[in-house]
């Protein structure tokens, strides 16, 4: 059992935990960078249905989405150096951070690829065909028509992904990396005030998650600023459409079983 609860430790632990915030944010930033690159490369074969690469992409996605991130950390940290020894590559002295970012990046890439694929396919194909009809080339249609809309569609999913990644970094301490969760556990072991340490940690995660959510929400609104809201004319059309439908219903004679012509 730990020491009796003392709320003053919560405030004293906050600056000590914040000293390792940079490590946590480095994991998030590095993993997102690796994840975006990996997700884009994995999404392309699925978008263009390249036979062999499409099968590889599906296996990749199934593995990283179907296995716990903790097991993936152990597999990459302990297994990857052993595999690379077969080709005479020594990673025994590589920093733990390399394996952590690589694992989280590839894990994020699996979800990122599905987000990219779903966002691109959600854009109306007719707009792309109209761009071709106007003389645009493939890359021009993608950059000017598809990409802006796909980004706006992807931002809500990307926001959830970033916040989930931030919380998943709490498992990096299992490999001995001193990030915020590892620091909280160390402070709890030293002082025996575990509840206070984890309350301070939860508060920091909550503030960061809330801040990221608001920033990404602002980015989503900025990307959606060109979307045309429902106009008054469109609303009047809907009202008239309902009234016309009611007139048709009212014009149906029960005895004849049809509308009066």
Image (cartoon, rainbow, N blue to C red):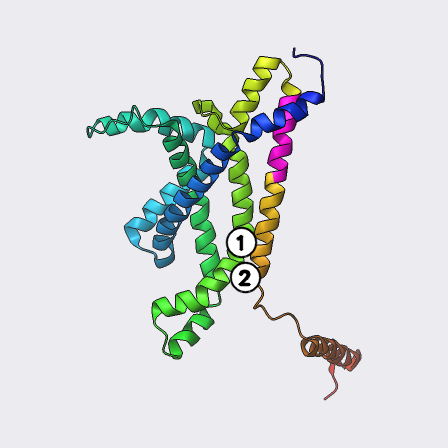
Labels 2 and 1: the sequence-earlier one:
1
Query: Which secondary structure type mostly characterizes the magenta part of the structure?
Result: helix
Q: Nearer the viewer, residue 40 or 259?
A: 40
147 with respect to 250 (left or right): left
Instruction: Give the magenta part as a residue range.
Output: 196-207
Instruction: Confirm whether residue 176 shows in the render.
Output: yes
Please identify the quadrant where the C terminus is shown: bottom right
The answer to whether residue 7 is above or below residue 57 is: above
The answer to whether residue 148 is above or below residue 115 is: below
Res 100 quadrant in image:
top left
The spot of residue 179 in percent (x, y) is 50, 28
Q: Give the labeled residue for mark 2.
A: 223
Q: Nearer the viewer, residue 188 or 62?
A: 188
Mark 2: secondary structure: helix
Q: Nearer the viewer, residue 18 or 127?
A: 18
The answer to whether residue 77 is above or below residue 158 is: above
Mark 1: secondary structure: helix
* Residue 199 within the magenta-colored segment of the rendering: yes
- Residue at the location (53% across, 59% down)? 152
Front of the two marks 2 and 1: 2
Q: Give the labeled residue for mark 1.
A: 155
């Amino acid at each position: 059992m730990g020491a009796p609860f003392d709320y003053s430790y919560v405030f004293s632990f906050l600056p000590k935990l914040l000293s390792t915030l940079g490590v946590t944010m480095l994991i998030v930033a590095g993993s997102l960078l690796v994840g975006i690159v990996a997700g884009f490369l994995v999404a392309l074969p699925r978008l263009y249905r390249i036979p062999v690469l499409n099968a590889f992409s599906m296996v990749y996605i199934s593995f990283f989405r179907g296995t716990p991130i903790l097991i993936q950390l152990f597999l990459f940290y302990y297994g990857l150096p052993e595999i690379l020894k077969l080709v005479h590559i020594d990673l025994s002295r590589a920093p733990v951070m390399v394996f952590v970012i690589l694992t989280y990046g590839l894990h994020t890439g699996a979800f990122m690829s599905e987000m990219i694929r779903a966002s691109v396919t959600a854009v109306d194909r007719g707009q792309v065909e109209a761009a071709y009809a106007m003389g645009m080339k493939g890359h021009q249609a993608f950059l000017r028509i598809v990409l802006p809309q796909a980004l706006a569609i992807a931002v809500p999913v990307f926001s959830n992904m970033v916040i989930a990644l931030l919380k998943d970094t709490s498992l990096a301490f299992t490999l001995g990396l001193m990030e915020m969760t590892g620091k909280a556990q160390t402070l709890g072991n030293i002082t025996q005030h575990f509840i206070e340490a984890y309350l301070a940690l939860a508060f920091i995660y909550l503030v960061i998650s809330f801040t990221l959510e608001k920033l990404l929400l602002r980015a989503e609104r900025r990307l959606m600023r060109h979307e045309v809201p429902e106009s008054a004319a469109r609303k009047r059309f809907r009202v008239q459409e309902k009234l016309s439908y009611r007139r048709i219903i009212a014009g149906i004679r029960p005895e004849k079983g049809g509308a009066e012509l």
